[in-house]
Amino acid sequence: MVDVAQLNGYMTSNPVHPKMHRPVVERTKKPTWALDQAKALLLAINSEYRVPLIVLAMTGIRVGELLALRWINVDFLWEQSSLPIASGAGN
């Protein structure tokens, strides 16, 4: 927005220096499980927790989003590939 104001002559200089305010973040590779490790976990846990863990693993949603998920969000008839979740369980 400030750049547009500067281009249109409303400001002579940009008081916001984007490169100056950006934090340096060191990217690290996050650990992942191998398929055999995931299978071993699913076989070792109580059966009532298997479906939620499979949903977490297969969709990539967060735990709070999983807890906020309701059957009304799941579209079996239209085979929709997205799950509209407005907010997590903590919100």
Image (cartoon, rainbow, N blue to C red):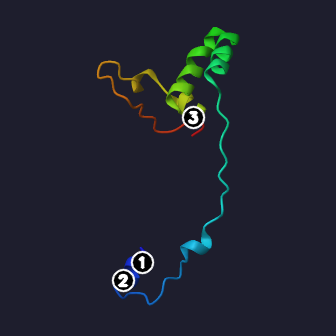
Q: Are marks 1 and 2 in contact (CB under 8 Å)?
A: yes
90 vs 33, nearest the viewer: 33
Compute the Cα span from label 1 to label 2. Answer: 6 Å
Instruction: Please rate how many residues cluster around mark 2, counting C-alpha atoms within 10 Å: few if below 14, some from 14 to 19, many from 20.
Output: few
Q: Secondary structure at mark 1?
A: helix
Instruction: State the residue at coordinates (30%, 18%).
Output: 77
Compute the Cα span from label 1 to label 3. Answer: 36 Å
**Chain-order first, disc 2 or disc 3:** 2
Q: Secondary structure at mark 2?
A: helix
Q: Secondary structure at mark 3?
A: loop
Q: For mark 3, what is the residue?
A: 62
Compute the Cα span from label 2 to label 3. Answer: 42 Å
Question: In the rendering, at what x and y percent does residue 2 appear?
Answer: 44, 77
Q: For mark 2, what is the residue?
A: 7
Q: Quadrant of the N terminus?
A: bottom left
Tell me the amino acid under the disc marked 1: Asp
Tell me the amino acid under the disc marked 2: Leu
Tell me the amino acid under the disc marked 3: Arg
Question: In the rendering, at what x and y percent does residue 21 appear?
Answer: 61, 71
In screen coordinates, is 15 left or right of 12?
Answer: right
Instruction: State the residue at coordinates (33%, 84%).
Output: 8
Question: In the rendering, at what x and y percent does residue 72 appear?
Answer: 40, 23
Quadrant of the rendered structure where residue 52 is?
Answer: top right
Q: Quadrant of the C terminus?
A: top right
Instruction: Please rate how many residues cluster around mark 3, counting C-alpha atoms within 10 Å: few if below 14, some from 14 to 19, many from 20.
Output: few
In screen coordinates, is 81 left or right of 59?
Answer: left
Mark carried by residue 3? 1
Instruction: State the residue at coordinates (49%, 27%).
Output: 69
Mark carried by residue 49? none
Instruction: State the residue at coordinates (66%, 58%).
Output: 25
Instruction: Establish if 41 lies above or below 26.
Output: above
